[in-house]
Amino acid sequence: MNRRIVLAYDGSINADWVSRYAMQMAATFPSHQLLLVHALDGSCSREQIEGKFAAITAECRQHSIECHSALLELTGDVFTTLLQAIPPGEHSYCLCGARIAPRGRGFLAGTISDKLLRCGQFNVMAIRVVSPGLLGCPRTLLFPLAGHPRGFKAARPFLQMLAASVKRLYLLRVMAVNPLHFRYISSLAAKKKIADGYDYLSRVAAEIREQASGFDWHFDRNVVLSDDWAKEILIQAGKLNIAMILLGATERNLPSRFFYGNKIEQILRNTTCDVGVYRAI
């Protein structure tokens, strides 16, 4: 079955920026297919969305991408309407935006993108675009890893969809230390944690080289100790002049409505580069 990108388009300027990522990613699939979906909730007129879809379709045509679009009458709320229109299963990849919600309510917490990430019916990536001039083509990618035994398995399709533009891939392992103990960790314990982190990244790098062969990526690896992994990711992204951060989401680390202390929300709020938050089924 052919894999296909579906863009959940809300009519905003941020959605226009995310559409560039959608086109670039669709071009990496053999089917070269992109589906645009919009739920007619009254935030934009039908004529406005039709005009924007026509512009995206014309650009897709220039890149030999087969673009289809669907304007959806509301069936209940926006999320329910989108859920009925997006094909379920592991071959569907839904892209959506992550932008500041009204009244400062955060970038993901309680949004349609948050609900799509949680639904578990298809693969999802929510993208916050900080640098629209990249046109969906980041050349440097920071990939923080939390040490999961599966390595980069869940992230593999998302990495491959970015592979055409990425030239340098930075693997980062932040070894978290309890804030109460961070100042007092011994040199021996710190070295052990750092060594364990590099062992893990070496295995992941070897796995990426094996399973994503053919891509011209230069690898860099870094392991740091920190009592705040979100802050460390932002520091490293700044030091390395990163174009995009790729973050894995789980039900545990997705923002709740009490989002100010949530790590992913902190990264989305304070980032100086594009961020993609992905969740695979």
Image (cartoon, rainbow, N blue to C red):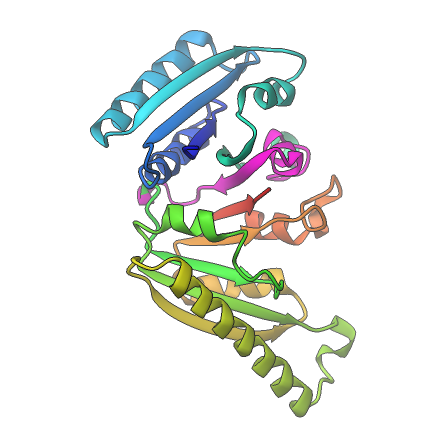
Name the outermost residue toward the right: 180
Residue 174, percent from left and from top: 59, 69
Name the outermost residue toward the left: 62
Q: Which residues are magenta?
A: 105-134
Closer to us: 160 or 103: 160
Closer to us: 205 or 126: 205
Residue 84, percent from left and from top: 59, 19
Task: Indicate the quadrant containing the N terminus: top left, top right, bottom left or bottom right.
Answer: top left
Residue 12, percent from left and from top: 46, 26
Residue 110 sits inside the magenta stretch: yes
Residue 80 sits inside the magenta stretch: no
Q: Quadrant of residue 24?
A: top left
Closer to us: 89 or 117: 89
Check the image and report above or below for 84 versus 221: above
Q: Residue at x 64, y 36 (%)?
A: 120
Residue 208, percent from left and from top: 43, 62
Name the outermost residue toward the front: 1
Check the image and report above or below for 223 versus 92: below
Q: Residue at x 40, y 66 (%)?
A: 240
Task: Indicate the quadrant containing the C terminus: top left, top right, bottom left or bottom right.
Answer: top right
